[in-house]
Amino acid sequence: MRMAPLLGGRGHRRVTRAHNFCAGPAALPKSVLEHAQAELLNWSGRGASVMEVSHRSPAFLEVASQAEATLRRLLGITDDYAVLFLQGGASLQFAAVPLNLSAVGQSVDQAVTGQWSKKALLEGQRFGPVNIAATSEASNFTTVPPQEAWQLDADAAYLHYCPNETIGGLEFGFVPQVEVPLVADMSSTILSRPIDVQQYGVIYAGAQKNIGPAGLCLVIVHHELLGHARAETPAMLNWQTAANNDSMYNTPPTFALYLTGLVFQWLEKLGGLEEMAAINRRKASKLYRVIDESNFYGNPVDPISRSLMNVPFTLADDRFDSIFLREAEQAGLLNLKGHRSVGGMRASLYNAVEEASVDALCDFMQDFEQRQG
Ligand code: PMP
């Protein structure tokens, strides 16, 4: 077992942390977990945990506003945008987007480049006509269609796309240029690198990859796009409700929000998104190099559209899969099984996955290839 020992738990029991490549809920920074652990029973001297105080208490409101302020600094979010912390995951936004942005009967544009944008398409179709502006289904979602080939609808309320497809490991190398509001499901790429928020009308992301624990969904929405929801939109799905109530129309998942604030602080301390991006590029290129230099491993994605965050790979023969997974687990390399819809392996290299974990994975893969290849 090549797991890094650390101190923690009651009476400083030694615990081991695995190299965790889970696609989500994903690894969280160790120092964040240690911080939360240290103050779990007695948060800020209150004799209670952060989970046991009112979400409307001044101390908790400060946690929420600090989380938002840190995120605004990290991503350079101006006052033109509202930052909302919602529930229901990214999946609920597949419905919230059409309800908030399109009138009854109005058409919308959707790019379909993988399983998640396809799910968004299917959900969107419940609410009105959806024009498939681009699709790479014919290539089994291994390419991003160049924008010159897209068929945009001039009357669409917005264009919705997924810049990083978590399952296929496919990432856009460009930001679509459109006349209508651009809506991006950034669940598996947000905070992995700097972005220009001004190019988007709406950005949303489930928290459980680069943001924090599951239970939160971040929505960044331009103020001009608020206030146009369809009349029948439930209050909990109407972004305006959340914006008017500092994301506290009802009880938010307080522990998730608290931990998310700690993750944002960790990122800022690390040097922000430029630094994070450099580390992420290094991690991904190490793993792709091992795949590309071998005759044993393969990755089907067009090299210009490879994801920095999710690296699917296959073995020369799928009869090696179960032994690969068993030996990897014995070596402390966890959650490498590919998504059930595509098979093979997938290593997710989110922000909290340390470079040393990627090194351990690369070493293991090369060793496995030598023994089995
Ligand atoms: N979009 C993308 C790109 C995702 O990766 C996921 C989850 N893996 C979702 C949407 C759905 O997110 P949630 O489980 O938070 O609803």
Image: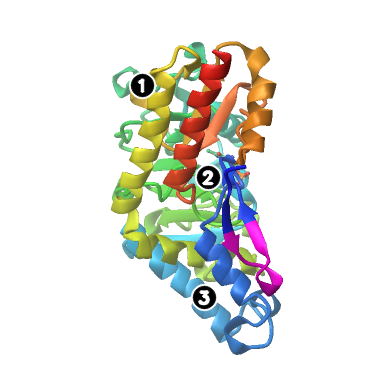
The crowding category of the residue bearing disc 1, from other C-alpha atoms within 10 Å (few below 14, some 14 to 19, many at least 20), is: few
Tell me the crowding category of disc 3: few under 14, some 14 to 19, or many 20 or more residues within 10 angstroms, Cα based.
Answer: many
The residue labelled by disc 1 is 303
SS label for mark 3: helix
Q: What residue do we see at 44% from left, 41% from top?
A: 184
Quadrant position of the N terminus in the picture: top right
Relative image position of residue 287 (x, y in whole percent):
42, 30
Q: Position of residue 245 (x, y in %)?
A: 54, 71
Mark 3 or 1, nearer chain start: 3
**Could you say which is closer to the camera, residue 44 or residue 255?**
44
| Image quadrant in which you'd find residue 7 | bottom right
The type of residue carrying mark 3 is: Val
| Residue 63: numbered disc | 3
Give the SS element for disc 2: helix
Specify few, some or many for label 2: CA neighbours under 10 Å numbering under 14, 14-19, or 20 or more: many
- Residue 97 image label: 2
Residue 326 visible in the displayed image: yes
Indicate the quadrant where residue 256 lies: bottom right
- Check disc 2 and give the amino acid type: Val
Residue in the image at 60% along x and 44% along y = 24
Part of the protein shown in magenta:
6-15
Whether 14 is among the magenta residues is yes
Is residue 155 at all visible to an observer of this figure?
Answer: no
**Mark 1–mark 2 distance (CA, rounded to whole Å):** 31 Å
Q: Is residue 233 above or below residue 269?
A: above
Q: Quadrant of the C terminus?
A: top right
Name the spot of residue 151 as percent of width and height, x first: 38, 20
